Image: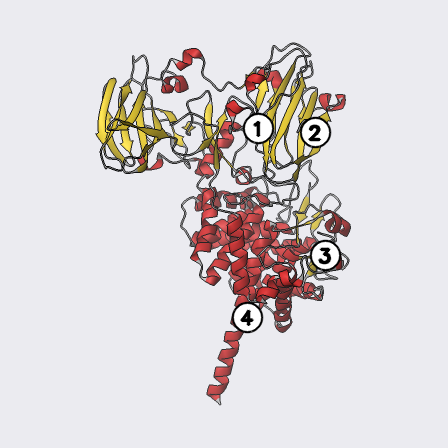
Amino acid sequence: MRGMWHSMTTYFSEPQSMYYRFGENQEQVLKVLAERYIGANAQADFVYRAFQQSGILQNDKGLYDLNLGKRFPDAPKDHISYAAALIWGDENRNLDVLVRCYGPVRFYFNNELIYRSTVIDEITPDATVKLGIDIEPGWNTVWLEMKNTPAGFGCQFGSDEGKVRILNVLAPFQERSGQAGWVFSEPVTSAQAQPNLLASQGESNLKWLPETQWSASEQNKSALERIYGLLPGRHAYAWTNLNNRDTSGRPVRLSGQSSGPIQIWLGDKSVATIKNAGSFEVEVEATFGRNDLLVRSECQAGAGSWGFDLKASVGTESLQLELPQRVQGALEECWFYAGPFESGAEPELADLMRLDRVYRTNAGQQGTGTSGVSQAGRTYWRLDRPDTFIRPYYENAMLSNKWTVGSVTNYGRWDYPLGVTVYGLLQAGRYMQRTDITRYAAEHVQSCTQMYEYSLWDREQYGFPSINQQLIMLKMLDNCGSFGSAMLESYTECKEPTFLPIAERIADFMLNRLERQADGAFYRTCAGEYAENTMWADDLYMSTPFLVRYARVTGKSEALDEAAKQFSLYRKYLFMPEYKIMSHVYDFKYKQATQIPWGRGNGWTLFSLTEVLEALPEDHAERPALIEFFNELCEGYAALQSESGLWHQVLNHSETYLEASCTAMFAYGFARGVRFGWFKDPSAYVTAAQRAWKGLVSNAIDRQGNVHGVCSGSRYAFTAEYYDQDLRTVTNDNHGIGIMMLAGTEVAKMEKHLSERTAKSTASTVHSG
């Protein structure tokens, strides 16, 4: 598809275009864009799965650490162990995976040998092999064969850039269906054939770990004793759902055995307090359908056990107890457990019976994960199975190497392209007075931030977080600036209490901990990586819109001052005066800019500059220079607009393809410049913005609201060929959807502004006449 843009300016025939259907009507186009996006990205919660902490964990790079030398320190030389996992594919996609060997490794994907380690791979410290795999629709199998040698035993395995390209693996075999994580075998003397990973593990000759069932001796204990042991003075909670199918309104009878004091709540009401061990029976009022049922159990000093058994019934009919939340991999369980808590460490009842909280277990412990304290002394819900916790996952957030999304859902993901998507939804919803759209956008952000403290705990427990990876693994502006800006923008829609503590963390990172040149300019150190010691035009967007909103929400003007200062500094390094546009990157290794003006990098620059100018006070010291800079850039961009109304992927290389996202950003910037009065001569930019919008609805947005012609996420190069030939365009890429909505709203606002101004001028003339 990308090649079509070299010879024409559309992906589709004229009747398929948004222009053919609605012309340049911004509100109709915005409606279709927003509704298509929301329809394709339903408000689906995270998928919760059973995960065994005694299994294979990830390191801080997101690689699964299968160090079998630590698991089996006494394994004889040349013995072999296997690890297996399943990957679900919704569609065909490619993924780069990394292998780091501790010893000899063979990697099979879908029963095909993909990689056999070399002696260099096995003995070179930190040697990393990158391999491309083609994930197919349905179940895909991963099979690792690892041999023990004196040099090491096992490997690390995972996706390249694991916090962005998330690789969730599921346990194979019917007995573990739906469970997250790997299985691995005890060492054996000789090689084994790969068994059917979708069948029973009993059909294999290997002993698979981690164990999913309690030992015979543990099964004779109560659930709380086998999970936590005997802990006099401690208490724990158990949570289930009572499914009342009785329509007569009769009371529900709760009965069973207790090994010590228990308290029972139904919903938010305490319904029973059992002070002594023994049998109990109480009648309670329960509404039809599902009712949260919570039990607090104490372990008494000198007691031989603790816990309870509980059944529910109406008359002679037993009622079903069910898990409060669907958990994949929990095949027979009906209770969640949280604990053990010290005396005095009492969670608030309002904070129990929910999955977006972690709970302090130590009396007197202060602070929360949000404010940065250690997550030690905290816990989360788990199952009655060895070392088995509940973990939330982005079920469908596994991006390919080119950031394509396809049919998967983006909802609930913290990710920089989604920051501008959320912003676009907010602005389009506000312009159309569609509270359903703005609410959807704000709730996307809330779904991330409300799980922030859990994400910190998850990382500490398991090495790598299962959600909010980019926010938690905060190392560069991409990880926080864009989505952080959208978070603060949505603060006007909902005063979500988790927003501001996260904003403080992001602001501290940008203002106090981010890498800078000696003159104060933000840049990327990225030691040992391809982008080492570089400055990117993109980072003006990744930083300054957040700083503007942070200053607005908190009143801390130094953040706005910093945003203005960065534009002056970036101009010094990246401005190309002969064209009046920006180079994509300055490479400090070579002490020069690449002199390649990538379209979207320039789009981010202009987009962000308008955000800063809107916020800068009229008397701000930097304002005159930034107004001048804005006019210079717009003059340079306007001169390079094509006849179609769109701009080229590399702005001053007309042989490169026409690209949609930079076009939308230039339309956005021009329209705002007209509306806010920043241009010395606005007339040419009114025309340029309107031509750009017409070009987009004619050539880049089809009548179903699909967005075409958006360049995938970029690295950088010193040649235009890389941007033209290696960066493919992607349909419905998140780098483009939101900015299309923003462009439409701003062109509409510009036209309304001009219409109102003309009407006032006409009325004034008539009145004076």
The percent coordinates of residue 28 (x first, y second) are: 53, 63
- Of the pair 158 and 233, the residue shown nearer to us: 158
**Residue at mark 1:** 58
Q: Residue shown at 45%/45% (left/top)? A: 446
Q: Secondary structure at mark 2?
A: loop
**Residue at mark 2:** 128
Looking at the image, tell me whether mark 4 or mark 2 is earlier in sequence order.
2
- Of the pair 316 and 382, the residue shown nearer to us: 316
* Residue found at the very far bottom of the displayed protein: 769
**Residue at mark 3:** 5
Q: Residue shown at 57%/47% (left/top)? A: 416
Q: Residue shown at 38%/13% (left/top)? A: 220
Mark toward the viewer: 1 or 3? 3
Q: Label 2, label 1: how many angstroms apart (C-alpha)?
A: 16 Å
Q: Which mark is residue 751?
A: 4
The percent coordinates of residue 293 (x first, y second) are: 31, 31
* Quarter of the view holding residue 264: top left
Q: Secondary structure at mark 1?
A: loop
Q: Secondary structure at mark 4?
A: helix
> Is 722 left or right of 254, judged from the image as shown?
right
Q: Label 1, label 3: how many angstroms apart (C-alpha)?
A: 42 Å
